[in-house]
Image: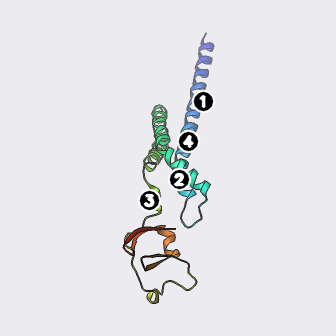
Amino acid sequence: MTTTIQADNRTATFKRNNLRRIAWLALLLLVISALILVLMPAWLIQPFRPQTPSALVRSYALRHWSPIVTLVFAVTAFLLCGWLWRGARWWRKTALVCALALVCGAAWLARQNHFEWMFHPLPNPAYARAREANFVGDSDMVLTVRVNGEAVAYPIRQMAYHHVIADTVGGVPLVATY
């Protein structure tokens, strides 16, 4: 009789330990997936690197779905952490807090406009006459605009960081992009 009870206890402990391992693995996959979901769009369209049309499509699709998916991930991670918390040692509890913080951080980042962070518009473009613009070399590429007899040139080297310059040329407001 006691042998049967001990065998049943061992089986129950084995099943519980396997469930906990699966829960830890699921939590790890949630953390990795949430971080990839948030960081991949920024990596796909990183500045100072040419962007492809397919990368932009993927980036905007991920950007569109990431707020919803990361919220589901955060709720799932919270439930998993709550279940794994009971009976966990202090170092595992620390790992649970870190995992939950990463998933919640990804959920918060998914709601931020990191494209605006990466391509921050130049707020007040300053002008220099061509002969005074000694920071622009003869071989440097420039984007030129001529409107109503007024012409301006934007050095590509400077636009590479900002990508967007709001300006008024010839009395017409425009946005120069690169």
The residue that label 4 is drawn on is 28
Q: Which residue lies furthest to the bottom in this view?
A: 131
Q: Which residue lies furthest to the top in this view?
A: 1
Disc 4 residue type (three-letter): Leu
In the structure shown, which secondary structural element does the residue marked by tag 3 occupy?
A: helix
Disc 2 residue type (three-letter): Leu
Residue 91 shows in this picture: no
Q: Which mark is residue 39?
A: 2
In the structure shown, which secondary structural element does the residue marked by tag 2 occupy?
A: helix
User: What residue is at 60 percent from the left and 25 percent from the top?
Assistant: 15
Q: Residues within 10 Å of mark 4 (few under 14, many from 20)?
A: some
Q: How many numbered marks does the figure carry?
A: 4
**Mark 4 → mark 1, Cα distance in angstroms:** 15 Å
User: What residue is at 57 percent from the left and 29 percent from the top?
Assistant: 19
**Mark 2 → mark 3, Cα distance in angstroms:** 14 Å
Q: Residues within 10 Å of mark 2 (few under 14, many from 20)?
A: some
Q: Nearer the viewer, mark 2 or mark 4?
A: 2
Q: Residue 18 carries which label?
A: 1
In the structure shown, which secondary structural element does the residue marked by tag 4 occupy?
A: helix
**Mark 4 → mark 3, Cα distance in angstroms:** 30 Å
The residue that label 3 is drawn on is 116
